[in-house]
C-alpha cells in the first residue's frame, strides 16, 4: 500500500476525520461490550 499517496489523496483534513471516526467507532464498541457484559471492558 502506498501510504504517502494515500495521505496526499485524502489530505490532512481527511486523515484527521478518518482517525476521529476510527476512535469514535472503537469507543462505541467498548461501551456496547460493557453494557452487554455488565462490567467494565478493558482493551
Image (tube, grey):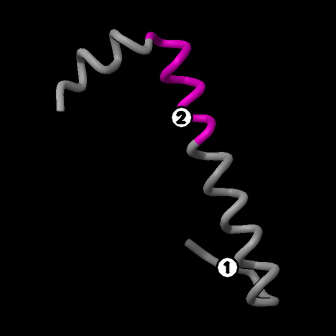
24 up-or-down from 40: above or below: above
Identity of the residue drawn at 48% across and 12% down: 12
Identify the residue at the far bottom of this view.
Answer: 38
Residue at the disc numbered 1: 41
Instruction: Bin the neighbour count of mark 1 within 10 Å (Cα to Cα): few under 14, some 14-19, many 20 and up.
Output: few
Identity of the residue drawn at 61% across and 76% down: 42
| Of the two numbered discs 1 and 2 in the rendering, the one whose residue sits closer to the viewer | 2
Disc ID at residue 13? none
Quarter of the picture containing the N terminus is top left
Upstream in sequence: badge 1 or badge 2:
2
Could you tell me which secondary element the residue under label 2 belongs to? helix
Q: Is residue 24 magenta?
A: no
On the image, the x and y values in percent for residue 34 come to: 75, 78
Q: Judge left or right: residue 6 versus residue 28.
A: left
**Quarter-wise, where is residue 33 in the image?**
bottom right
On the image, the x and y values in percent for residue 40 come to: 74, 81
Q: Judge left or right: residue 10 versus residue 42.
A: left
Identity of the residue drawn at 55% across and 71% down: 43
On the image, the x and y values in percent for residue 39 come to: 78, 87
What count of labels does the image hold? 2
State the extent of the magenta-drawn residues as a range. 11-21
Prevalent SS, magenta region: helix
On the image, the x and y values in percent for residue 25 come to: 64, 51
Work out how far the residue at label 1 is from the one at label 2, CA to CA, in angstroms: 22 Å
Identity of the residue drawn at 24% across and 25% down: 3
40 up-or-down from 29: above or below: below
Disc ID at residue 19? 2
Instruction: Bin the neighbour count of mark 2 within 10 Å (Cα to Cα): few under 14, some 14-19, many 20 and up.
Output: few
Q: Judge left or right: residue 38 versus residue 23.
A: right
Amino acid at each position: 500500500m502506498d501510504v504517502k499517496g494515500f495521505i496526499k489523496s485524502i489530505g490532512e483534513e481527511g486523515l484527521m476525520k478518518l482517525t476521529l471516526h476510527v476512535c469514535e467507532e472503537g469507543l462505541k464498541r467498548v461501551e456496547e461490550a460493557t453494557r452487554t457484559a455488565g462490567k467494565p471492558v478493558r482493551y
